[in-house]
Amino acid sequence: MRTFFHIVSILFFTNLNAQFTNLPNFDQKEFRFGYYLGLNNYDFKVTNDGPSSKSAELEKGDIGFNVGLIGDLKINNFLNLSFEPGLSSYSKKLNFYEFITGSKIINKSWNIKSNQIHLPFLIKINSNRYKNFRPYVKLGISSSININKVTSSTGLLPRDFKFSSLNLFYELSVGLDIYLKYFKLSPSIRGLFSIKNEIPNNFSSDLLLDNINKLESRAVFLNFSFY
């Protein structure tokens, strides 16, 4: 990835000083198609019923990947509609803990392996083009179909737990269109925020340590789109 960032930096400064405008009519087509590759970092927002010594958290440091297609519809010079179906994959460990005499004691740990079919519908708001660059923001909503595999690393199996299969998000991203000689490259950073509790309504077990009533996914995507 460091090599890739170096390449993007070289392309950026090369285009900044370019004497010619690359792909001058590239954005005039009504429909545009592309694909993206990227990395993701998923987390959970944990909501308790009230103050308690018990909670849950994800271990940090695991990075997943994204891959998908892009369908883009031009509305006018500054607005586009995008549909970006793809696959997001990640692996995490979720620890359930409580504080006993000031020390954090982990009672249960779950290994979560997830492949999510991600279906975002986004509005792209473009700025004016400057030479071979065009900043933009994207915002919208998305759904994902979760294929989660939950296993226990502490010997206590979550026999009656499965994350909700359908999740809903709102999304916000900022990016930069870089017009190269033969194609357009668009690196972007995107935030995803779940608006749905991923604990099933019929869940009745003490595996979530009683007082935890909401688990909501959050994620950061670093995507590189090619058109």
Image (tube, rainbow, N blue to C red):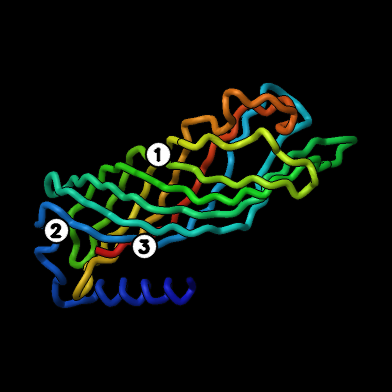
Q: Nearer the viewer, residue 188 or 215?
A: 215
Secondary element under disc 1, as helix, strand or loop, is strand
Badge 2 or badge 3: first in the primary sequence: 2
Give x and y (percent) for residue 216: 55, 35
Q: Are marks 2 and 1 in contact (CB under 8 Å)?
A: no
- Neighbourhood count class around disc 3 (C-alpha, 10 Å): few under 14, some 14–19, many 20 upward: some
**Residue 224's disc number:** 3
Q: Residue at x 28, y 77 (%)?
A: 14
Residue type highlighted by circle 3: Phe
Badge 1 or badge 3: first in the primary sequence: 1
Residue that carries the numbered disc 1 in the rendered image: 143
Secondary element under disc 2, as helix, strand or loop, is helix
- Neighbourhood count class around disc 2 (C-alpha, 10 Å): few under 14, some 14–19, many 20 upward: few
Q: CA distance from mark 1 to mark 3?
A: 21 Å
Quarter residue 24 falls in: bottom left
Give x and y (percent) for residue 29: 10, 56
Residue that carries the numbered disc 2 in the rendered image: 27
Residue type highlighted by circle 2: Asp
Q: Residue at x 90, y 35 (%)?
A: 101
Quarter residue 8 falls in: bottom left
Badge 2 or badge 1: first in the primary sequence: 2
Give x and y (percent) for residue 50: 69, 22
